[in-house]
Image (cartoon, helix red, strand yellow):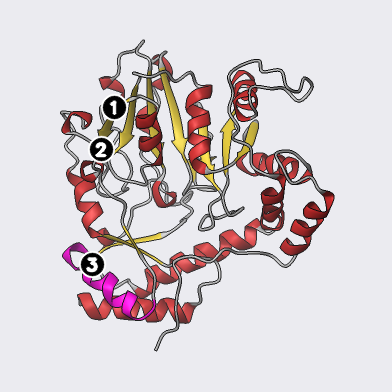
Amino acid sequence: MLIRVPYSIPYFPKRTETDVMDTFRSTRISGSGVAIDYLEDSLSKLLNTNFGFAVSNGSAAIRMALLALGFRPGMRVILPGWGFHVAANIAYVMGAKIEFRDVDPDTWCMNLDGVLESIGKTEDAFLVLIHTLGNTSNLGLLEKQSQYSGLRIIEDSAEAMFSKFHGKNLGTFFDAGTYSFHAAKTITTGEGGFVTVNSTELATKCGLIRSHGMKSERPYFHEIAGDNFRLSNLLASIAIGQINEIEIICNKRKMVYAKYLTELSGISEDSFIMPSDPRGFFPWGFGLRLGSRRNVIAARLAELGIETRPGFSSASQLPYISEALIADDSALTHSDKLSEEVLLLPHYPDLTDKTITEICAIILAEIL
């Protein structure tokens, strides 16, 4: 009989408690301090980006990126029809004219065929890429994006920290990248996020927007109407040990993913996500297409104490989405199917081979 297996457990190195208590005793627990500086500097280097900003959560990261890139109500925002719809929610609330495109049935990320051609070369518009489960779209189809002067591209890399495409980190290709430090993510601060930009001009805007529109050298003077998206120094201290052991964390996650693939090797290859770049793919989570048996298998696993997550919802299923928000030439066929068939299995660094074998045995017994 299996003991309870949670969907995710954070990995905390031994030094974590010491780092947190040191920050606590320093009394620097709000939006600035040594821990935040360390997190921003170290992670920017790991991601090979010019500027990185720690923020309060992944949603704040997307909102800050939109604001820094000049978003205005009524602007067009193009998004994938399947994935965790944080960017869609935020864009909708901010007054965007949002439009969904279907995902590719193999990569489970936005199908970029014809996307650029659907945008006017001087049109003010945003394209938001969701790098789902560590994978990405065929970014080669965006090689001509520089010809579209009004287009801004944001990479939602909440699930793709340390994934690469042709040797370059996801989240660093275009105008801005966003990441999450949620408890289930590769690096966690409980709640938190990160924004990457390479432009000095954008970095200045991000710094102002994040902290009430103020510069540190002139407190209480608001140069712009900013917000407060700052991560606390106390929460940032949780990440210090993880950054120092990031190779261990990444290797453990890769081994968990590889073990799942080995144990489930008897089922069809189209049950798994297909990496756009197999060499650069870093799996944040493990998704499995189970067809009409998805809910039955999820219920069986739950009976045995194994926590799973259903695949993300298709945009067509969201109550606030109307048919008018789905591109006429891009019905969400594959997005709809994935939302009905994908099950996300437990995936965290210290998940044991024995437990993975037992989980897979239960699934195989149901489908073979």
Q: Is residue 296 magenta?
A: yes
Q: Residue furthest bottom?
A: 1
Left or right of 338, for residue 282: right
The stretch in magenta equals 290-305
Residue occupying the point 66% across, 15% down: 223
Which amino acid, by three-letter code, is at mark 1? Val
Q: Which corner quadrant holds the C terminus?
A: bottom left
Residue bearing the label numbered 1: 115
Magenta segment, principal secondary structure? helix
Tell how many labels. 3
Q: Which residue is painted at 47% across and 56% down in the image? A: 284
Q: Earlier in the sequence, mark 2 or mark 3?
A: 3
Q: Please name the amino acid that badge 2 sits on.
A: Tyr
Image height check: is 278 above or below 141?
below
**Percent x, y for residue 316?**
21, 42
**Dot 3: within a 10 Å radius of its alpha carbon, few (fewer than 14), some, or many (20 or more) residues?**
some
Q: Please give the residue where the numbered disc 3 appears in the rendered image.
A: 295
Per the rendering, the mark at residue 93 is: none
Q: Is residue 274 visible?
A: yes
Look at the image and say whether residue 22 sits in the magenta stretch.
no
Residue at 77%, 19% in the rendered image: 218
Amino acid carrying label 3: it is: Asn
Check disc 2: other Cα within 10 Å, few if <14, some if 14-19, many if 20+. few
Q: Which residue is mark 2?
A: 320
Residue 134, given in percent of the width and then of the height, sits at 44, 50
Rendered image quadrant of residue 88: top left
Q: CA distance from mark 3 to mark 1?
A: 33 Å
Identify whether 119 is placed above or below 317.
above
